[in-house]
Image (spheres, rainbow, N blue to C red):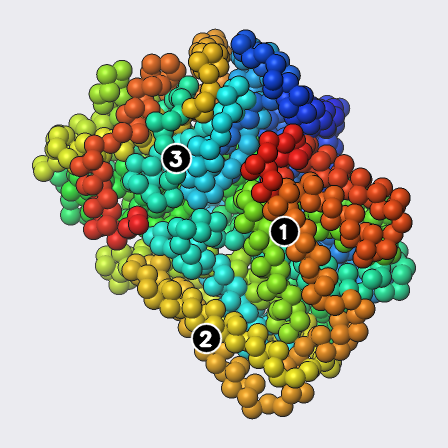
Amino acid sequence: MKLMKSISRGLTVMLAGVAACALTSTAQAEVDFSGKTVEFVIPFSESGGSARWANFFAPLLSEALPGNPTVVVRYRPGAGSTKGANWFQRQKTDDGTLIFGSSGSTQFPYLLDDPRVKFDYNDWQVILASGVGGVTYLPPELGEKFDGDANDLKDIDFIWGSQGATRLDLVANLAWKMLGMNVQPVFGIAGRGDGRLMFERGEANIDYQTSPAYLKSVVPMVEAGRAVPMMTWGGLDDDGNIVRDPTFPDMPTFKEVCEATDGCETSGIAWEAWKAFFIAGFPAQKMVFLPKTASAEVRATYEQAFKDIIARPDFTKLSEATLGAYPQMTGKGAEKAKELATKVPAEAKAYVVNWLQEDYGVSLK
Amino acid sequence: MDLVATALPALGEALTLIFQPAQIGFLFLGVLLGLSVGIFPGLGGIAGLSLVLPFMFGMDPVSGLALMVGLIAVVPTSDTFASVLLGIPGSTASQATVLDGFPLAKKGEAARALSAAFISSLFGGLLGAVVLTFFILIARPLILAFGLPEMLMITLLGLSMVAILAGRIPLKGIVAAGLGLMVGTIGEAGAGGSLRMTTYDIPYLIDGFSLVIVGLGIFAIPEIVALLRQDRAISTTGGLGKGWLEGVRDWWVNIWLSVRSAIIGVVVGVIPGLGGSVVDWIAYGMTVQSSKDKSQFGKGDIRGVIGPESSNNAKEGGGLVPTLIFGIPGSGSMAVFLGGLALLGYDAGPHMVRYELDLTYTIVWSLALANVFGAGLCILLSGQIAKLTTIRFTLVAPFLFMVIAFAAFQSRQSLGDLASLMAIGMIGIFLRRFDWSRPAFLIGFVLSHQAENFANMANQIAGAKFRQSFGTGIEYIASPIVLAILALTIVSVVIGIRQSKNILGNGDTPTGTKRAPMIFLLCITGYLAVALVNALSIDMISDKIFPILVSGIALAGCVALIFRMKMTPESDPLFTDFERGGEDGAAPHGLWSTLSWFAFLLVLSSLLGFVLALGIFFLSFLRIRAGLTWLFTAFLTGSAIAFICFLGGVLGRDFPPGLLQSYFELPWPLT
């Protein structure tokens, strides 16, 4: 059954390859993917969140695209995802049989001028942007000291498990620093789940999780009295303002906490830097791109397909388990998200680079 | 017995859920896929799972789970074929099986070794399932008791196995492990991201070497090359010797060994963050330490097969405990499994264990049933597959070269994969030739990352705890679990040092002049010295301290060895050189000419792409080296290419492209 399906799929891939080669010269005006195979390439391995995200969209996309092509997820991991992105930069597929999914881990090296980055987001055409949020939480005894501002948290030695200074955790480290909290990151954990485990074991006394992970694993801890939420990173409205996270409307955002805390400002260079990296890391965390060479018809077809997927009556239900209840942006919204996520003012970038060097001794050269 | 009262009804419900024709069908399909994936060296559970992942979305949850669990459960069963029959670790879970399983196959007792391995796998798998059943309800506090100091201690316990596997000259074993640890540090440091022994100009090395490539390079390539030089079948007797019943009897005689090893497997599997790649080594080490007569280990002792094989299937059941309770994957395949679970609409975690217990228990049943199906099928097939050892190896070798090159390429899909396979293979060949312990090297490599990370992180947290108060700090680093594992480690080292002479080598070994072994030692010393200098140039303490420490110790070992080499005569076992006598020395074909066939394939791939290269390689190899007729040559070449295209197509994997492909657009599979 399934095996036969796999085998026949393998054969289809073979035949499709031969057929595609034979047919490249024929007409291409109408975008119809019948009998074609779309490769959805992600620069990560099979085991990460991006794989989950891509495998969620792949079958839906297959249904939504005209001609119902086979959509296969391909993994090109390496060099913190810059390897796959560099590869995608070199591709010239113009018939829509190649799409690429990037994530915050791809955006951050780009923003920080990592020497491995040989790609340029300006060249890519965005067709979908998926967002996510994040929640900071504390152990109950420290949670008592938090009353909407971080003034009483300034003389506590915080420790937390972090994946690395230049990873997504940068947003958390910078936010806590701006609040004047003394947080020592323990670098080198494999995923945020391990950070949560350190918190549960009492080795760490502060942590944050992305919203789906928070809902799934931290909420039970909160209910059992083992953790207290502190703040969210916030959400983004259509004009690019930070507002309360739609999933957690009762929790204050970092912006609110910062305003209430002595010495923390929601303007100026530090704030601009934090905001830029926050947007790149959360509201526009995962994006789907077509190569620069893809035609306008192909792009329009894909935009429509993603619009159709999101408009499915069962989409909210389907996506909740896998992606969390977050906005999936297409068209103009996706453009705007990409813009915010990949363009950082030069001073803000310099500020972050300097801070990474001073506080963690990390140099990106 | 609250526990039983919760577990039993849910177990019953789960049983009715799984015992439906469709679900059993999917389970069986998963088992078949898992067996087929596991049989190819280097392709593990991840490759198999990502094959079924695209179908998960929208599937009935029980069927989906049955398919995935069936697949995961039997990979460590069928990977034994490669380990025993070919001396190639089928996956990272069966590396230790090679040590005794392969010598048994050479003696012509392949069928016995295989059936002992499968029955041990079956038993371990079932034990793992039983543990999963009850443990999953109570394991939470236990798992939370394993903090970073405890995990560091388990890692050190794993490293202490080097003592027993060090071989004839303990000092050489220590240096080999040090070298493995140092090779493991190549790339971006886990803590601060500093680059070690690489630059941004060599992007390949930034991620370090993958375990698959190192495993294949250290074990597979030296073995294939050595066998190929003989130009005969693997089984020296040409037959299969005792049948599979003998193996089952062997297992029964050693039932307690099997129980113990399975428990080790479960325990190590349960602790998140350790990964399963050390389980078989710990089990092997413990097997040797606890045996009275150690003289046959490394030369074909059936207990050396039963121990690791009982543990590696048990590990899967253990590994599911933290995966399901915390939603934190214990290994790469578990991470993909979690992804598949999400596509089925479920999220692993306390919620699932508490409120979806019947569904959770379908995993247990799937695990148990899959182990029975898998081991049963393997035992049925083992007689037939074992005949592989009676075929002239020259006809098998090109297929193996093909499969391991393909498998290695899957790790990063870069020509760097093929180059590093060749480079590590060379190291493996020299380690083998000069009688340096390859297991020691591999254990060092496997544990390098964990040892460094856990040590760094435990150190930082301990610092913070000590700042709070001295008592809190001590309580943190010297917990009862830490002390208990420490004691175990010390015992293991003491026994190991006392016994290691007896294992992996006694009797006379050929020695030649001092020159060749000395040059190799100097090369290792040189590398370690360069790595030390490189580590010293790093700014961040957290990224430099571990390589400095390890290379310092290993260098001290090298210096001591150099002095010993100066003092001792040429006939000392220190100068073992297998090219100077024995089987290798008398081989009809030279080492370099044989190895260059493999190099030929890799170079050709980098020029013409993999599939075209395979065509030329097969034609020339079979015609020139094997001396076959054109007809037979063409037939084998055709079937090899058809096979690899099928494999690549079904798994949805690319083939290595060459220079040619960067100039011309070619249709699949030539891309």
Label 2 chain ID: B
| Mark 3 and mark 2: Cα distance apart in space | 42 Å
Q: Which mark is residue A67?
A: none
**Dot 1 surroundings within 10 Å: few (below 14), some, or many (20 or more)?**
some
Which of labels 3 and 1 is toward the front? 1
Q: Residues within 10 Å of mark 3 (few under 14, many from 20)?
A: some
Q: Residue at x 83, y 52 (%)?
A: B623
The amino acid type found where label 3 is placed reads Phe
Q: Is residue B23 left or right of residue A134?
A: right
Residue position for label 1: B603
Q: Residue at x 43, y 71 (%)?
A: B529
Q: Amino acid at mark 1?
A: Val
**Depth order, front residue of B588/B421:** B588
| Among the two numbered marks 2 and 1 on one chain, the one whose residue lies closer to the N terminus | 2
Residue annotated with mark 2: B555
Q: Is residue A101 above or below residue B46?
A: above
**Front tag of 3 and 2:** 3
- Mark 3 falls within which chain? A
Q: Secondary structure at mark 3?
A: loop
Q: Amino acid at mark 2?
A: Leu
Same chain for marks 3 and 1? no
Measure the C-alpha gap from mark 3 to mark 1.
Answer: 29 Å
Can residue B651 be seen here? The reply is no
Give the residue pinned by disc 3.
A119
Q: Nearer the viewer, residue B355 or B60?
A: B60
Q: Chain of mark 1?
A: B
